[in-house]
Image (cartoon, rainbow, N blue to C red):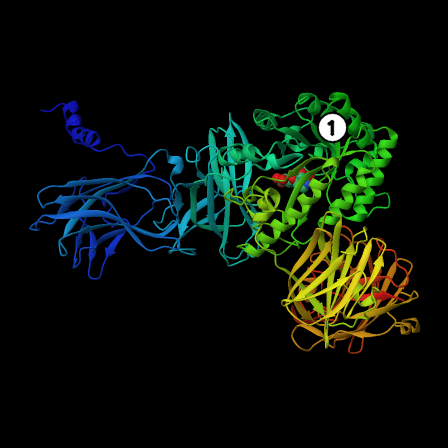
Amino acid sequence: MRTLLQALVALLLPVLFLAAAAPARAAADHVYDFEDGTTQGWSPRGDGVSVAATTGAAHGGAASLLVTGRTANWHGASLAAPFVKGVTYRVSAYVRLAAGQPAATIALTVQRTPAGGETTYERVAAATVTDGAWVRLAGAYLFTADSTDLQLYAESDDATGRYHLDDVVLAPQGDPTREPIAADFEDGTAQDWSPRASAALAATAEAAHGGTRSLAVTGRSASWDGPALNVLGRLGKGDKYDVSVWVRLGAGVDSGRLGLSIERRTAGTPSYEQIVPPTDVPAGEWVRLAGAYTLSRDVDFLSLYVESDTGTFPFHLDDFALTYVAPKPIQTDIPALKDRLPFTLGSALTRPDTFGVHGELLARHFNGITPGNELKWDATEPREGEYAFADADDLVAFGERHGMTIRGHTLAWHSQTPAWVFEGADKQTLLNRLESHVRTLVTRYKGRIAAWDVVNEVVDENQPDGLRRSPWYEITGLDFIRTAFRVAHEADPAAKLFINDYNTEFPRKREALYALVKRLKAEGVPIHGVGHQLHLNIEQPPASSVEDTIERFAGLGVQQQVTELDVSVYTDFVSSYDPIPGELIAEQGHRYKELFDVFRRQAAHLTSVTVWGESDDVSWLNTWPINRLNAPLLFDRDLQAKPAYWGVADPSKLPPRVRRLEAPAGEIVLDGKRDQQWDLLPDAPIARVGEVSAGFQARTTAAGMYVLAEVADRSVSAADRVTFTVDGVARTVTRLGGHKAAARPTPTGYRVEALVPKGTDVDVTVRDGGTAVSWTGKVTPAPAVKLTTAAHRAPVLDGVAEPAWRAAPEIRTGTWIQGASGATATVRSLWSGSTLYVLAQVTDPALSEESPNAWEQDSVEIFVDPGNGKTKGYTDDDGQYRISFSGRLTVGGTFDAAGVKDNLRAVTRTVPGGYVVEAAIALPTATLRPGTLLGFDVQVNDATGAARTAAVTWNDATGRSYLDTSHWGVLRLA
Ligand code: XIL
């Protein structure tokens, strides 16, 4: 009788033997053993071939894959290979011929198509194989170019040979952090996903993004409850991963936002980071949440999950993928930017930027840094008196290691400040909290942080006193500013103390900030410098307004720094490109050149220029104000130099610039005077070189093209001249005029007008001795810019067209931007004081406000641009004022419409066959006087039920009036 022990040993022996014989397999290995009776993703390669799991022969276990029906050498069994670029794999497999087959050479081969190249075939392993024994094929495989259609297959030099394949192992070398993770739920399981709390997860065939199944998520207990994947050990510190997952709302859910987040814990303390912020998921649609993540700390817990911003609605998840992104090495054969500039070149950074190639890029090109978030109040003092400095310390240490100058950002701000700071605070309490905070931070980094943004964004040029109505201001007036500077100065007398703000390049904001700094200095507040954030865009504002700002503050005797420079490729808050057109990226290079020309010229007043991030992949503008691809910085997403880089380092390497300009129909008197016609549009700027700059415009007429150059050049010389070259034919005009041309002196230089032949390719070159500035690009004809007049009187705002209105000329909407017929309006304008009045008499027999969207209701929109700036994108005081037939008001402007939202009043009245809108629009930022020109347009939206079925404007034919002011008409005040 066998003892129990003997029985156990007998049972276990084969298992132990197997365990000893089999090579060690890591969790991340791909293993194909066919033990489940399926082909495990292997499929026939070639017509007539079949592959099937069989128990007839097996290397390990009981089954293998049998390949039959081959008629060509390249026929066989094939697998869509899970190989990842840049990862080396050990590949091994066992092969044996079917009984009776003659010996043959069996090979494992990879077929692959590199991007833009021809399909390649790479042999991984091969051996002579017989029907008498299992033979091991083994080799390594790596590919490094972006490729598609990767297939691993087994082929034989015996065209008809039948064989068995078993125990195929694809083992990524190195560590599991290079191994991709995927989930498709096609096997009917939740595939390693588990609920964060009590949600129910189940693979379901109810909906699928790819294949036939997805993961259904139901019964969520909170917005953060849902499917989670443990990725501990799978992400390398400092490595970048692309993460992507498809989501869809559950049946019956009609709206919701879903995002992708990660929870990490260090020493048990959790932190939550959004990889993709909650994004709108329209009912019935699959939406991809895709982002990149870099783990920047040592962790003992790491979990990726999908959550909603609010609600516990059910949803589906499918086709998840997480892949390691092998970094491109940074370029080492290009000049280090910091060596080429007469001031410190800084970059904002966050902790992940200190690792790997990002860290290398920072160290190579920058000699300054600003922690992007780590010194803000929410990061440093989340609860009263509980300070957290781990991240800030780390970044400061990084800066010191690389000999960089460190900016501290920021001590008092209305944003990223925890609610407790203001809670129950009377003035003294708030100032006490501020004092402790400022003293703690500045003392901690005394001697290490050279400059502090003591207060951030405190100016609001739309307030009568120019000060932002933040809780700081509401509770303390100006005292929070005084306290913050005083305490910072006490804590580190050597630190340079800055007031920092955005839009300082716009005249109204510039002046409001100027007045504040002047006042604080006069009071003796220890304010040493002004920080210009300079969040700009590809069109706006011109480099000259940045220069004007620097020159303005130079007179105050303060240091200046550019603190957050970036140049968005977008001019509005809704558009998005993917990919971003190369032409814009090239244009941006010229923008950067013009800006750095200004900075170099003004270097005596500037101690540093900081860009808000070292490379496009880390820019905040990828998620603000909406999620969209943006490319606002000097290096691209792969950390390679962009034209923007060359614009700073060596403009001679910039691609040629091709500008575009419309030449509306218009008549000009050639006398060197600036006709009102020219004032309908702004001059296209030609940036300054030396002491010369200029502006350019064109108009089309039957006889040719009128051109205008407004030249700023104070030194009069006989060599001063402007050459207009149209399609290769040049015409030169001096200060004295010329053929079909006129010239006249102006306070800053001279003006030239000429009539030249019509054409497309235009070059305007302005010369002053050896210096030349030019504009080169394409000019296209366009319809005339419409002009109307507002009479000077005030109506009674009652929805009645009293006789006063007859003083103003009537205009009519007739430019269809949707449909070709429908509601229209006749419109008249009056003005008085700083208010514009508009009367619109609308013909529209059927009125509807059914749509929840204001622009799809029967309504009138009035567009007003107080400076007639004709900018692409809205500036602060540009407004879109909408009045529905029933008197509902909606106002659009820059993204929060802060500068215009309170400007509109209106009375409406329905009348037989339509309605009347009488509107009053306050224009506090403009000085209204006879002759003033306003950018102006009117649009009528025609609703049928819940849809807009037609829309018509007075002037703008683009359909983009709500985004772009450049095609509005002009209103002149009489
Ligand atoms: C931004 C950061 O870059 C983002 O990561 C954060 O989510 C929001 O704040 N003006 C400022 C900076 O003064 O602090 C802002 O930084 C960008 C605008």
Residue 564, image x, y percentages = 67, 40
| Residue 436: quarter of image | top right
Q: Is residue 229 above or below residue 313?
A: above
**Is 225 on the left or on the right of 964, as rendered?**
left
Determine the residue located farthest toward the front in the rendered image: 718
Q: Amino acid at mark 1?
A: Lys
Does residue 474 appear to the left or right of 389 in the view shown?
Answer: right
Residue 426 shows up from this direction:
no
Quadrant position of the N terminus in the picture: top left
- Between residue 970 and residue 290, name the one nearer to us: 970
Residue at (23% x, 33% y) in the render: 23
Q: Could you tell me which residue is drawn at 34 percent across and 49 percent down?
A: 187
Q: Residue beneath label 1, please?
A: 496
Left or right: where 134 falls relative to 683: left
Give the image location of residue 195, x and y in percent.
Answer: 46, 41
Mark 1 residue's CB less than 8 Å from ligand 1:
no
Ligand 1 picture quarter: top right
Q: From the top left corner, tell me how far across and down residue 105 is, in percent.
A: 14, 47
The C terminus sits in image quarter? bottom right
